[in-house]
Image (cartoon, coloured by chain):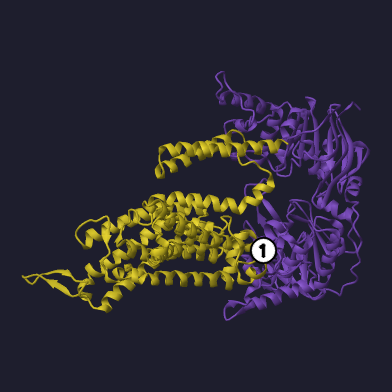
């Protein structure tokens, strides 16, 4: 917050955000060069839509993750929250259509004997269709409110560390979503299902790539709203104060427990909002694996965007760029390597987070005069890095090349470590 | 007297901005119990840290048993047979007593595996020697404080330490535990151990010691045979501290009573004493500065926290603010009632390091900088810059990092933070700690001006001259009790110190 300078300071842009923008441009450039199909040039529209969709999908709840991190906490549960909220939405729709209210709302299909056999979504009027969607999404958001409240209660009243509180909901909510899904389908559709197809016209409409602007718009509006909260309200300032120094915040007369309540509810409700787009994107409510592991992508986006996990530091602009950067890197790798992006996703997120945090501390690392590869730990770390490099080279390049990569990386790092050692002695 | 076992030659140590010790030289004779006395901040702890190898870079020379030593860590000190028993005990609470005693030098059996049984029986032997039935297998964290201390002593014995440093060992003990400690000390001395005993309780010092050394402001004052001196003399040596004298001029007579405190008590569960504060009663008038004196642990900070609704434990007693009952449960309620607290530990409890000067000043009064429900940076700028102007805060700009300011200027920002809330009462907990001399007198003038404007101010300080300069009245706390009250005209450093060491 202090290292701003001159012109950029007036725009409210920080050095790490500039670095991110440059990195994004660089990656687009590299992809243009390395991708034989020149996909970013010839199919820029399709690519923009895909990246826009993916960035919105991640960014919406990355903003929530950021809010919690800035307040000095952590929310590990958002991936499961997405599954839970998605299941609440899907089950609400099933309930409204097949439950006791169904025959009031929907036209009933009658068999030849005059017995009603089903309610019919496709032929229901626009009003009923909208009503079902609005009520269901409201239920999903409400579930976010309650889960966020549960987190805040566990953390402030039971005094659990945020890590433990949200770790238990990370595990618990997914299970709960599966239970809810099986109960609702077996009770109202007479067959126990582990997942539900989402065929409501609203979600099919939303899935259409022509309507991706709406995804991006929702992300932008939420980002703008979050920006106003953090930068222009007392609440936001107090969140920064809470994350920066909780004791001092309390002794300044700030109701820290209420702030935490807000932060965790915001975190869970953004995950609920994201679940709407997850349902549309995948066309299915799958509590078993929807959003699984994605909480870490959201935290990564926030951290890459400059949030400090110690709390008190982080911006909307940074998180926005962090999410965009992650999605572009993932997309770029899939373009260059031409294999499924999802296999590489975790590796990319991991590497990007390590690099981003390392770069932000590079100055400190150099200043402290600490060695990067000290002693036996250093030698083993060099071997580990060489092996990982070989593994990556093997899958993209070939086995012979992998061996050479391994030797190359090992020699380079070993020489670096050796000079480091000499310097430390001299 | 026999040859000195430890001799200190011109020991000096500086921390950034503070000279903690300078030119301290004295000898400790073999087998004696040598008491070291001094006020808070006199340099006792720093000196002991040097002796026990916690601090390794210092000026001067240290000789142990006639040989010059330069410890590189506590291991070296232990090898030279010096052990320290810290005031805040240094045990790993999750490990057993035996494991703590042998931490870092675990006993092994013939095939190199750790041998808990050997450690337990060795620990048991030492503990029996100390007349205690502590189970070596019990977790250190499950023991009472007095027993934990014995474990520390047992650790020193297992190291065969000839020189033991005890840093205020009785501060957390019950009377029977103190008696037991005295017996242990007698036993240790029979075995020929030399003991360095840090305390500011005169009765203990005179009961136990052979000789007494007084430190003040990091300087050696004198060493005296205990039999040749008395408590009054020692207290006088402890307090003869000089500061720049500053006459703040006469003050108008205090107004009506703002705050009345009746029988305030605060529990301290799990501690031998059972209370942090007991039956404290006083009042504060408009336009008055009330000083609160007391040594470390006397309950000054706890008293401030009670008044500010930030108490950790249950508070009993009656508070009347402007004649109306007042019982704050959260600092927010205290703020709303018109009370501000400038905390003792500025770094930990005061500043927001990630925020700039402007934001640090405005944090408590953001509600008055709103336009249409949103923060107006113009109003915030105005409010903060008015304080920076009034209090003459030296800062490059309002956008500078708060951490780039000197301690005194940071403190002014925090005072300004509270003045923006337009308080009736300002609580200042050791406001000049870590503040350089020039900035101190500026803060004194500021406090003086505030109460001329009709504020009631309660100020604590570990420096007596400061309280004598600032206060209209001075209350003295000792171990949670109010032991004396002086008007400024009647108060002297010796009187206050006597009441504080009672």
Asked if A227 appears above or below A322 in the picture, the reply is below
Q: Nearer the viewer, residue B402 or A326?
A: A326
Which x, y percent locates residue A350? 48, 50
Residue pointed to by mark 1: A2
What colour do you see for chain A?
yellow
Measured as percent of width and height from the top left, residue B324 is found at 67, 73
* Residue B303 horizontal/vertical position (percent): 71, 59
Judging from the image, what secondary structure is the residue with disc 1 in? Answer: loop
Which is more toward the observer, A188 or B296? A188
Would you say A320 lies left or right of B430 here?
A: left
Q: Quadrant of residue B264?
A: bottom right
Instruction: State left or right for residue B36 relative to residue A52.
Output: right
Which chain shows up in purple? B
Quadrant holding the N terminus of chain A: bottom right
At label 1, counting other C-alpha atoms closer than 10 Å, the crowd grade (few under 14, some 14-19, many 20 or more) is: few
Report the front residue among B197 and B106: B106
């Amino acid at each position: 917050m202090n290292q701003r300078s001159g012109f950029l300071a007036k725009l409210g842009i920080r050095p790490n955000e500039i670095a991110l923008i440059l990195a994004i441009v660089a990656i687009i450039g590299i992809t243009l060069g390395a991708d034989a199909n020149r996909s970013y040039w010839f199919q820029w529209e399709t690519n923009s839509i895909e990246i826009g969709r993916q960035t919105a999908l991640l960014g919406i709840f990355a903003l929530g993750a950021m809010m919690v991190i800035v307040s000095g906490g952590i929310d590990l549960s958002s991936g499961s929250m997405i599954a839970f909220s998605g299941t609440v939405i899907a089950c609400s729709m099933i309930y409204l259509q097949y439950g006791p209210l169904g025959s009031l709302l929907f036209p009933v299909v009658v068999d030849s004997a005059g017995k009603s056999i089903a309610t019919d979504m496709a032929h229901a009027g626009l009003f009923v269709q909208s009503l079902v969607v609005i009520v269901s999404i409201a239920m999903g958001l409400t579930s976010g409110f309650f889960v966020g409240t549960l987190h805040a209660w566990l953390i402030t009243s039971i005094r659990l560390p945020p890590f433990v509180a949200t770790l238990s909901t990370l595990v618990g909510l997914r299970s709960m979503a599966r239970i809810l899904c099986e109960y609702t389908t077996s009770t109202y559709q007479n067959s126990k299902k582990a997942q539900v197809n989402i065929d409501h016209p609203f979600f099919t409409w939303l899935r259409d790539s022509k309507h991706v602007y709406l995804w991006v718009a929702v992300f932008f509006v939420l980002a703008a709203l979050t920006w106003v909260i953090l930068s222009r309200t007392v609440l936001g300032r107090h969140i920064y104060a809470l994350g920066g120094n909780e004791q001092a915040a309390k002794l300044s007369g700030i109701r820290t427990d209420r702030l935490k309540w807000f932060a965790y509810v915001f975190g869970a409700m953004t995950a609920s909002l994201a679940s709407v787009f997850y349902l549309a994107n995948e066309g299915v409510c799958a509590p078993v694996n929807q959003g699984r592991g994605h909480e870490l992508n959201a935290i990564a986006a926030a951290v890459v965007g400059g949030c400090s996990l110690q709390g008190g530091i982080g911006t909307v602009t940074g998180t926005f760029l962090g999410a965009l950067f992650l999605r572009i890197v993932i997309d770029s790798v899939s373009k260059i390597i031409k294999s499924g992006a999802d296999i590489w996703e975790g590796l990319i997120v991991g590497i990007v987070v390590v690099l981003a945090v390392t770069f932000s501390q590079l100055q400190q690392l150099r200043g402290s005069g600490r060695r990067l590869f000290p002693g036996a730990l250093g030698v083993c770390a060099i071997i580990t890095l060489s092996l990982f490099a070989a593994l990556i080279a093997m899958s993209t390049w070939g086995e012979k090349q992998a061996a050479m990569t391994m030797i190359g990386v090992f020699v380079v790092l070993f020489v670096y470590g050796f000079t480091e050692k000499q310097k430390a002695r001299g | 007297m026999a040859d000195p076992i430890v001799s200190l030659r011109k020991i000096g140590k500086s921390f950034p901005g503070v000279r903690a010790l300078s030119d301290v030289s004295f000898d400790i004779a073999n087998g004696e119990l040598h008491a070291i006395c001094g006020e808070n901040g006199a340099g006792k702890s720093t000196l002991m840290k040097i002796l026990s190898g916690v601090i390794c870079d210092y000026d001067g020379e240290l000789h142990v048993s006639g040989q010059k030593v330069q410890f590189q860590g506590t291991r070296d000190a232990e090898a030279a047979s010096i052990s320290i028993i810290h005031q805040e005990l240094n045990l790993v609470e999750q490990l057993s007593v035996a494991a703590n005693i042998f931490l870092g030098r675990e006993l092994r059996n013939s095939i190199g595996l750790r041998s808990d049984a050997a450690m337990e029986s060795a620990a048991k032997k030492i503990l029996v020697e100390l007349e205690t039935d502590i189970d070596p297998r019990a977790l250190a964290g499950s023991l009472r404080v007095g027993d934990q201390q014995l474990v520390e002593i047992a650790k020193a014995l297992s190291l065969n330490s000839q020189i033991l440093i005890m840093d205020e060992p009785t501060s957390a003990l019950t009377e029977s535990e103190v008696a037991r400690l005295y017996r242990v000390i007698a036993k240790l001395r029979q075995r020929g151990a030399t003991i360095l005993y840090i305390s500011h309780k005169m009765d203990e010092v005179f009961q136990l010691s052979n000789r007494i050394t007084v430190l003040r402001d990091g300087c050696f004052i004198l060493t005296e045979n205990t039999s040749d001196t008395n408590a009054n003399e020692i207290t006088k040596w402890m307090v003869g501290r000089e500061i720049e004298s500053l006459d703040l001029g006469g003050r108008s007579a205090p107004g009506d009573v703002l705050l009345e405190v009746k029988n305030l008590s605060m529990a301290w569960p799990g501690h031998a004493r059972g209370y942090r504060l007991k039956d404290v009663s006083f009042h504060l008038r408009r336009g008055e500065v009330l000083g609160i004196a007391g040594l470390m642990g006397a309950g000054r900070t706890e008293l401030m926290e009670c008044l500010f609704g930030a108490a950790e434990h249950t508070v009993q007693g009656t508070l009347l603010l402007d004649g109306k009952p007042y019982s704050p449960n959260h600092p927010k309620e205290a703020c709303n009632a018109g009370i501000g607290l400038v905390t003792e530990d500025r770094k930990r409890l005061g500043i927001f390091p990630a925020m700039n000067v402007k934001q640090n000043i405005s944090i408590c009064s953001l509600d008055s900088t709103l336009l249409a429900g949103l923060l107006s940076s113009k109003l915030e700028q105005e409010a903060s810059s008015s304080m920076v102007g009034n209090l003459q805060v030296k800062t490059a700009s309002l956008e500078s990092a708060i951490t780039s300011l000197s301690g005194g200027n940071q403190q002014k920002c925090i005072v300004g933070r509270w003045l923006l809330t337009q308080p009736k009462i300002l609580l200042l907990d050791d406001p000049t700690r870590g503040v350089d001399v020039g900035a101190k007198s500026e803060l004194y003038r500021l406090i003086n001006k505030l109460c001329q404007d009709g504020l009631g101010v309660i100020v604590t300080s570990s420096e007596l001259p400061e309280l004598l300069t600032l206060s209209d009245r001075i209350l003295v706390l000792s171990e949670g009790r109010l032991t004396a009250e002086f008007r400024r005209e009647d108060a002297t450093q010796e009187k206050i110190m006597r009441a504080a060491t009672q």
